[in-house]
Amino acid sequence: MSLKHIEARAELESHIEANIIHSEQAHTHAYENSTKNGLPIIAVSPVQGKFTSLLVALRGARNVLEIGTLGGYSGIWLARGLQGKGKLTSIELDAHHRDVAIENLQYAGLKVPEDVEVLLGAGLDVLPKLEEEIVQGKREKFDFVFIDADWKNQWNYFDWAVKLSKGPGCAIYVDNAVKQMLESGIVGDQERVDDATDLVAKVGADPRVEATMLQTVGAKSYDGFLLAVVK
Ligand SMILES: C[S@@+](CC[C@H](N)C(=O)[O-])C[C@H]1O[C@@H](n2cnc3c(N)ncnc32)[C@H](O)[C@@H]1O
């Protein structure tokens, strides 16, 4: 295996999408309706969406938390992983994104807010409110957290994810963690951003979790994610 095989990545991704991803019409609709409504084209790919769905199913999750809803594309995958036996709570800063996401989630046959609740606000404002509601017994803790919002807060969201998790075995997935490390100059030749946080070093020194980071290559980009399990 050599790096030259990387040239076939787009062809391979199309082959994977055509054969094992089994995207639904609701996924295609979510992409198309989001684009039509002017949302940026930054949702996870079908391959990655399916991967997160499988992780939710593997974990047997019942309460999933997502930070960064956009048009609900990843939300549909996460909700499918719950197999009708749980709830997704997703946080989104932008009201227009939230509105389009609700349309797309409902189109996918998901009930809002029973199956998927989309909370409007900045992650760092909404998360303490969720904690209050958990303490008051109004809401359950989470067993799978998908972090896909503003990169500068990845560590802060991670810390909240551990605090709001049910405990041992709960999983936390941080999307775009590789790009964040490279673009903030933590590793590589880019100039280091002054207040950049080294997510790998922070998570690695955190006694609450075990984790790894995986580099990925897809049709359009090189990136990767961090996956942690609460001890
Ligand atoms: C990469 S997109 C999410 C993509 C989505 N998870 C998907 O794959 O379909 C990031 C989203 O996070 C939202 N966002 C940015 N900063 C945020 C913040 N501080 N709190 C909550 N959401 C935020 C953006 O408005 C955007 O919709």
Image (spheres, grey):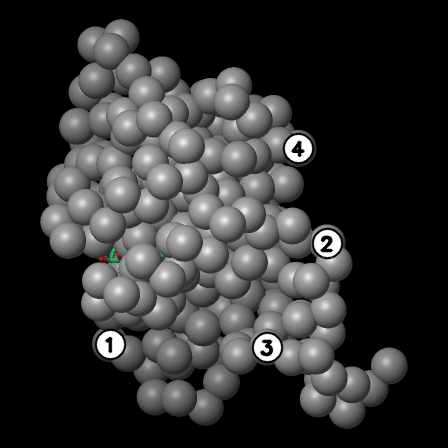
In primary-sequence order, the first of circles 3 and 4 is 4
Disc 3 crowd rating (10 Å Cα; few below 14, some 14-19, many 20+) is: some
Residue 100 percent coordinates (x, y): 24, 50
What residue is pinned by disc 2? Answer: 20
Residue 187 x, y percent position in the rendering: 48, 79
Q: CA distance from mark 2 to mark 3?
A: 16 Å
Can you see residue 152? no
Q: Residue at x 34, y 88 (%)?
A: 191
Residue 135 vertical position relative to residue 49 in the rendered view, above or below: above
Alpha carbon separation for disc pair 3 and 1: 32 Å
Q: Is 185 placed above or below 177 here?
A: below
Residue 194: assigned label: 1
Which mark is on residue 60? none
Q: Which mark is residue 58?
A: 4
Q: Quadrant of residue 38?
A: bottom left
* SS for dot 4: helix
* Mark closer to the observer (2, 1): 2
Label 3 vs 1, first from the N-terminus: 1
Residue type at the position of mark 2: Ile
* Nearest to viewer (mark 3 / mark 4): 3
Direction from residue 116 to residue 53 in the image, left or right: right
Identify the element where label 3 is drawn.
loop
Q: Which residue is mark 3?
A: 219
**What is the three-letter code of the residue carrying label 3?**
Ala
> Label 4 to label 2, Cα distance in Å?
17 Å
Identify the residue at image location x=29%, y=54%.
Answer: 70
